[in-house]
Amino acid sequence: MEEIILVKPTDEFEKQVMEYRQAFIDNNQSFDGCAGLKECESYHEWLDFENRLKKNLKESYVPSTVLLAIRKKDNKLIGIIDFRHKLNDFLFNYGGHIGYSVSIDERKKGYAKEMLKQMLLICKQMGNDKILVTCNKNNEASRRTIVSNGGILEDERQYNESPDNSIILQRYWIKL
C-alpha cells in the first residue's frame, strides 16, 4: 500500500470522482460513505453536500465531513470516507458515524484500514471519544478493517434495504 492522505473534495478531483461514480454504477457496487454520489449527475451537484442532503433528508439530516483518500505518489483517488458528526435513530441502528468505500481496482491493499485510521484521528480531534461503525455481516473485508482499528462488536441487526432484500448489519464501537 502506498501512502494516502485524506483531503476535502476540490475541483481538482472532479474527473476522478465522476469516474469513480461510473465504475461503481457499472459494477453494481454499494456507495457507502459517498454522501449521495450515486444520485448526483454532476460533480458540483455532489459537492453541495450540506444543502442537497438537508433538502433530501429533512429532519433526519446530520452534518458530516466528506473526504477523499488520495494516493500521494500519483494524486489518484483511492476512496471516499464520510464522518457523520452525530447519530440520529437510523444512523445509531444501521449506518454509524463513518461510511467508506474504496476504488474497485485498489481493494485488498490496506487502503480502507488506513482511511478509517486517519478519519478516527480527525474524529478524536473534533472531540469524539467513541465512534460507531457498521458493516454488512457478509462483508469480511470491512469487518477486518473495523476490527483492526479497534472495533468491538456490540450486536447485529436486521436491516431491510428493500421489501425483498434484508441484510444483517454488525455494529462496532471504536474508543478513541
Image (spheres, grey):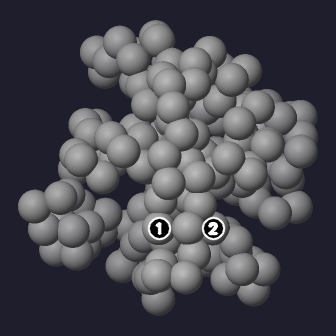
Examine the rendered structure and indicate whether residue 68 appears above or below residue 18: above
**Marked residue nearer the N-terminal end (2 or 1):** 2
Residue 119 makes an appearance in the image: no
Examine the rendered structure and indicate whether residue 75 appears above or below residue 13: above
Residue nearer the viewer, 95 or 16: 95
**What residue sits 56% from the left and 67% below the top?**
166
Q: Which residue carries the number 1 mark?
A: 160
Q: Where residue 168 appears, x then y in whole percent?
A: 59, 52
**What residue sits 89% from the left and 40% below the top?**
109
Which amino acid lies under the numbered mark 2 shown in the image of this protein? Ser
Q: Where residue 148 appears, x then y in whole percent?
A: 73, 21
- Label 1 neighbourhood size at 10 Å, few (<14), some (14-19), many (20+)? few
- CA gap, disc 2 to disc 1? 15 Å
Give the number of the mark in front: 2 or 1. 1
Which corner quadrant of the image does residue 147 belong to?
A: top right
In this picture, residue 18 sits left or right of residue 52: right
